[in-house]
Image (cartoon, rainbow, N blue to C red):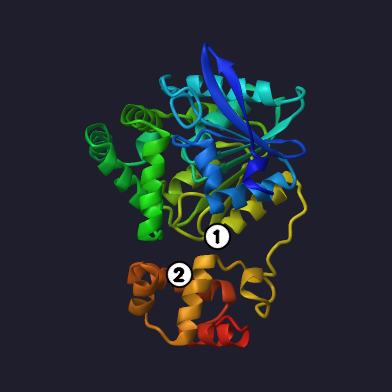
Amino acid sequence: MRPEDQVIHHAELDGRSIAWSAVGAGPLLVIGGWWSSDLELDWRNARFRRFVEQFARHRTVIRYDRPGTGRSDRDAAPPGTLDEELAVLEAVVDEAADSSGPIALFGGSSGGGVVSLFAARHPGRVDRLVLYGTYARGADLAPPAARAAMLGVIEQHWGLGSRVLADLFLPDATAEERAEFVEFQRSSASREVAHASLQAVYEVDATRHLAEVRAPTLVLHRRADRAIPFALGKDVAARIRDARFVGLEGDDHFPWRGDADAVARETLAFLGAPVDAPNAGSRSGPAGAIGLTAREREVLRFVARGDTDAEIAAHLLLSPHTVHRHLANIRSKLGVPSRAAAAAWALRHDLI
């Protein structure tokens, strides 16, 4: 699939233009609610595009930019409440859907509140709901003083605020990747819109409507997510009747980073699409077959070469602590007891 395969459309809501895109074919999978997005800039991101393309092989993937952001009406104020967010999502779904048939919804991070509200308000239209890295109450994301400080930084200095958010959202990124994300945030939303959007994130309270969701629901959350703690994902699952909760390894907040394939596999399997699961019962296959991320394969190559954590950290522009955590994940996935055993595995499979 080529970048130009994305087709951008526009829906109208109360005189505002909402940009939305479609890729792929088949039943609708609507991905909604990111507080900061840009349909075109996101699509140029190779990691992001590959993540979406995995779904587009089985579904028509619909994404959109909230008013005030990305390719939507930049002069419009962003939604300030969940009901306003819902109106935007409803406008996109009404425009994108060929019929009133059921759709699947994927809500990541702050998008979990609005897609779950759509599922609660329109039970007949949603056949599957996937929530990733999300939360029930914005007040639980951080103590009041920390929330006020974050809002203050963004309001007073969006450049500095965007860098703080980059550190939070991209813990294992290179300096270049963080710089690119800082520029992306500042391009996709103004200081005023970013401040208002984050304020809305903190004010979300989905506790009441989560109990009303009746669609089959999958809740995914990475165990070491720094932006939204793991416990908040478990709390979301506990509030939805019969929801299935899956804890994933890793600390990246965005699903298209880290072990993005694990997120895609769990989601596609839940949606009923045929997927090739990693061979968890065998430890003799290639690194990709047992679920090592690209970053973990990089770390393993240096381990096999005999480098220390500090040396690997210098090569990859990571902290030694992060390298140590990657190695722990690698050993767990390979089923080996030690660093030496991991190195031997890499040598046997020609990883260096």
For label 2, the SS is helix
Q: Is residue 275 found left or right of 77 in the rendered image? A: right
User: Are circles 1 and 2 on residues that touch, CB within 8 Å?
Assistant: no
Q: Residue at x 57, y 68 (%)?
A: 292
* Quarter location, residue 216: top right
Lower sequence index among marks 1 and 2: 1
Of residue 85 and residue 257, the one placed in the foreground of this image is 257
Q: Which residue is mark 1?
A: 259
Q: From where the camera sits, is residue 190 visible?
A: yes
Residue type at mark 1 is Asp
* Mark pair 1, 2: CA separation: 11 Å
Q: Nearer the viewer, residue 25 or 71?
A: 71
Check disc 2 and report the residue beneath it: 326
Residue shown at 44% from the left, 48% from the top = 231
Q: Can you tell which quarter of the image residue 326 is in?
A: bottom left
Residue shown at the point (44%, 36%) measured from the top left: 36
Indicate the quadrant containing the C terminus: top left, top right, bottom left or bottom right: bottom right
Disc 2 marks a residue whose amino acid type is His
Q: SS for tag 1?
A: loop
Q: Is residue 108 visible?
A: no
* Whole-percent x, y for residue 246 in the image: 58, 53
